Image (tube, grey):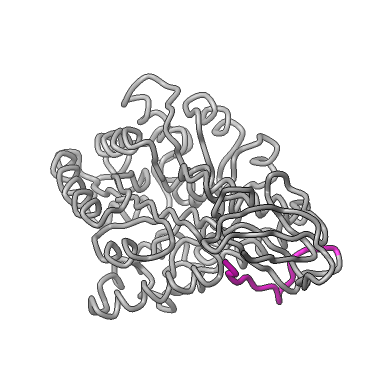
Amino acid sequence: MRRIAARYVYTLEGEKPLRDACVTLSDDGTVVSIGAAEEGDEILEGALCPGFVNSHCHVELSYMKGLFRKGTGMAGFIDQINALRDTKSPEEKLRDLKEAMDLMWDRGVSAMADISNCADSFEVKSSHPIYTRTFLEVFGTEPEDAERVMASVRELQKKAESFSLDAAPTPHACYTMSPELLSAASAAGLEAGFLSYHSEESPEEEEMIRSGSGAMWENRRAAGMSVPPVTGKSSLLYFLDRLRAVGEPPFDGHVLLVHEVCMDQEGIDAVKEVLNHPFVALCPLSNIFIHNSLPPVALMRQNKLKICVGTDSLSSNDDLDMLKELFCLQCNFPEVSLGELLVWACRNGAEFLGREELGTIAPEKRPGIVFIDHLDRSGALTSASRSRRLI
């Protein structure tokens, strides 16, 4: 048995912490009880919380750390990723992604929703203590290629499953897929019960879909690729229309809308109409890295959307540090308490992944225990705050 006491304990059964509290755990990390610290307990100056859930990551791109210019917008970012992909050896890629996963684990990540375009990460993820659901991202702008692309990703799914990974196809984004492929990949994700989708990541994406203009539109035309239909509506509404082509809404699968920098009330209303279990993944440091903008968090909170937090990849971020993402959100949205931020980073992510044994500190659960240090006098994060796994 082990007792861990701290000035604040965020069980996340609610947003407010227990003060001067103690968590008792069995030798295998199962929570036995939570209660007041007792005489003789060493009270850590900081906060305890469950393990984090990184709700959006591309760990296979960890070899790209430090290679990208910042502030290029999405069109510039896409040009860079196309030029820099596969610029390291398989051995270097494997080393870098394992180092990234080990560091995430040490900092407190217990589970991850990870995007894969190939099999590079499967072996490491299959033996790693971080639980991973792998989203096999689908691309293809030409309608005639949809059937071939889906057959290819199904083969990749079989390979992932041979490593005992939970994995299924998922659509990438409106601008990298024909309408036919977007619907087919969405159907596969809904069938699996989990779908992750890059949505409204930048104003350039919105220009492309709304008016057939802007840097991304010109980028695709210059490359000789088909472009998505011009709808006069947001890219989120376009995605929901492609879901309607799959079947009759509302849909029951867990659907994660990643980024949503341009989300508005019309889009939120449509999401609630079409999806029974929508989630939104915020990756603020990635948004700042690429185009120096942030999502409308106040609007999301006002509409009681289930917000999660991710790091995105080391192609669009300097680190895969969940606490730095939370500090960024706290700095830009100071009205959000640390307790609410941790609900986003732990409980909501676990709910999206269907891993209810994670996300909260409660008896008979094994969420992992994370310690956060260097809080200020009010209990908020500071620039010196760091997280580390205790259990």
Q: Position of residue 289 (x, y in %)?
A: 53, 67
Q: Position of residue 128 (x, y in %)?
A: 38, 65
The N terminus lies in which quarter of the figure?
bottom right
In magenta segment, residue 389: yes
Q: In this view, does 43 lie to the left or right of 174?
A: right
Dominant secondary structure of the residues highlighted in magenta in the image: loop
The C terminus lies in which quarter of the figure?
bottom right
Segment colored magenta: 378-391
**What residue do we see at 27% from left, 53% from top?**
164
Residue at the far front in the pictured view: 1
Is residue 151 depicted above or below 71 in this figure? above
> In front here: 97 or 333?
97
Q: Is residue 125 left or right of residue 382?
A: left
Residue at the far top in the pictured view: 248
In magenta segment, residue 64: no
Query: Which image quadrant is residue 83 in?
Result: bottom left
> In front here: 60 or 182?
60
Query: Which image quadrant is residue 305 in?
Result: top right
Q: Position of residue 153 (x, y in %)?
A: 21, 48
Is residue 62 depicted above or below 138 in this figure? below
Q: Is residue 328 left or right of residue 252?
A: right
**What residue do we see at 76% from left, 66% from top?**
6
